[in-house]
Amino acid sequence: MDVDTLNTLRTCGILVLLLPLLGAVLAGGLGRPLLRGKSHFPVIAGVLGAVICSFVVFFKINGLSHQEGAQTSWMVPVYDWLSAGGGTWFKVSFLIDALTCVMLVTVTFISLLVVIYSRDYMREHGVPVRGYERFFAFMGLFVFSMCALVLGGNFVLLYLGWEAVGLCSYLLIGFYYQRPAAAAAAKKAFLVNRIGDFGFGLAIFLIYLTIGHLDYHTVFEAVRAATANHGAGDAEALAQVLGINASAASVVMENIQNRVTIIALLLFCGAVGKSAQLPLYVWLPDAMEGPSPVSALIHAATMVTAGVYMVARCGVIFVASPVALTVVAVIGGVTALFAATIALTQHDMKRILAYSTISQLGYMFLGLGCFAASSAIFHLMPHAFFKALLFLAAGSVMHALGGIIDLRRFGGLRRVLPWTCLTFVIGSLALAGFPLLAGFWSKDEIIHAAMIHRPVLGVIALVTAVLTAFYTFRMVFRAFSGEQRVPEGVHAHESGKWMLVSLGILALGAVFAGYFGVTLHAGGFVGVFEPHGAFHHYLEPVMEPFAEAAGHGEHAEGGGHLLMYLSALLAIGGILAAYVLYVRRPWIPGLVRIAFPEQHRVVFNKYYVDEGYDKAIVQPLRQGGRFCFGLDEYLIDGIIWVVTAVPRTLAFGLRTFQHGALQGYGLSMAGGLAIIVLLVLFL
């Protein structure tokens, strides 16, 4: 790479980070005294600048990747951070490749639309000026943190960005901190994520202990060399990578082989927490207590996909451990089905979408665990569009109904919210996997990969696809069809232009984003669209470890036409079932609840997982805390009182001589000094 290109990448990477951060600082610092109701402008401008720089990086890397014999990833140094022993111990650097570009463009573009939407939403929700500028400052800080996570060229920067987005999540979920539910949800999200992040931190420590480095290139090349030759390893290659002698390389190679599964599983702990998978998914539904733009940005489109990004980025480590990759696939597949069943019985629109997010993230991990990493990232990108669209459209409903979002309290909104209804239906069709929309192509590829490598999980994915279509349109038909029902005293109205513009652009993405991953052919309808398009070719060099481990080419990630048609029929069948049960025969669901009351109660109460955690973990910890508090208050304080009894008694006797007269104190000091002098002279 020439110097000019390297400088361009470095400059754009720095600007992607600094512009949203600067917007956050201006909104937070100048919002109250100067900007007030215009505190959104610095953040919108900063995120817009980050979008432009992200696209510059994307097109620059795309152009370089088409050059014959060009490298596929670039480590861009920024500055030396820590130095020790006369050398540099830790460098701040960017790793820029196809995966980085896809994530940057997705994160910044979706963030821009959400911030634009937030201008009207937060202003018309009666948020005071101080809260208004605080909200946009937190949003800009989040975009900065997420971009730092994506751009970082080593595990330390990854961890710093990882923790920073967790902090932003806590601040934004608890934005309405005056409400006990919002404050509790923020604490729950923070604490549950700490469980996964503890394992993630241990993984990074173990990587450094084993390899002695934390930059991606060195770690990945070391793992690749240590597990080469079908697991036997290549000591010479490892010695060359680490710059050590052959005997030391043999020891390191053995350590890597013994620890790679533990490292991969500990890394996956962090992904389970951040991406809300079983068993650490419980924080995400409660996080809906935050404003709707927060739900769209952090808990649907960007932050929760950090775990997917991390596993894809660390593909070399995960494919070196078949056990770890199996765990990824099983957790993903089971989570997808588990969350989909809960969504069947919920009434809160945002919570239904929250469980849908958990389910779709499960699809992504299933794809990663079935060696279809390109398909998993492909699903991540359109999912960001249609899920952000659905959350913002749900926010538009909430905005129109004065904060009410319970499906039991309204209906027939298509007449009063026509544009919101249209965009919500488009997003729902994409989520359901309706043919030719964005979600159809990516979901089909993951199901096909699962059918090839893990057939049982493939069947689970098909069942989940049917449930997804059903619960999504159960929500659509209950909210927008039938007779118009609006809560008493509420004047329902369509959203403002800032909100509708964001919804419209996201709707276009929900329709067309999937076509980046398919190839168009001339001819009749059958065979016109073939999976594995430009998107997969673009990511192919980064995802090569998954393809090599699977023993097949990347083209095998695409689905066959038979499975494509089956997936389409299942999606349509789920939509038709929802139409029959909630439009044509709305009395049937009531009969089902009566016929199966226990089963419905269990699913409606989310399998009592939260209650189980409360009894098994939370309450024992609280009891332990109360015991320790009592121990400290009575036993420890009692011991201290006894130990200090003697000096207290002496002090009681001596303080009678303390009268507060300075002359007396001066006379005593002079007398004491005289005694010391006499003793020195005569003894």
Image: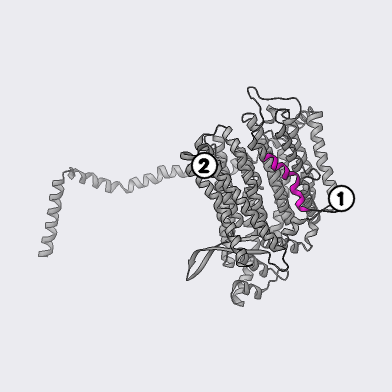
User: Which quarter of the rendered picture does the C terminus lie within?
Assistant: bottom left
Q: Is residue 642 magenta?
A: no
Seen as rendered, the residue at the extreme front is: 4
- For residue 623, the mark is 2
Q: Which residue occupies 65% across, 35% down?
A: 497
Q: Which residue is mark 1?
A: 562
In depth, the one of 515 and 387 nearer the eye is 515
Stretch of the chain drawn in magenta: 502-518
Q: How far across and down, in percent of the image, does residue 50 sit?
A: 60, 51
Q: How far across and down, in percent of the image, does residue 475 sit?
A: 73, 34
Q: Which residue occupies 63% across, 41% down?
A: 295
Q: How far across and down, in percent of the image, does residue 640 sit?
A: 35, 47
Q: Residues within 10 Å of mark 2 (few under 14, many from 20)?
A: few
Q: How far across and down, in percent of the image, does residue 109 sit?
A: 65, 48
Q: Which residue occupies 75% across, 59% down?
A: 537
In depth, the one of 523 and 189 nearer the eye is 523
Q: Is residue 449 left or right of residue 276?
A: right
What is the three-letter code of the residue carrying label 1? Leu
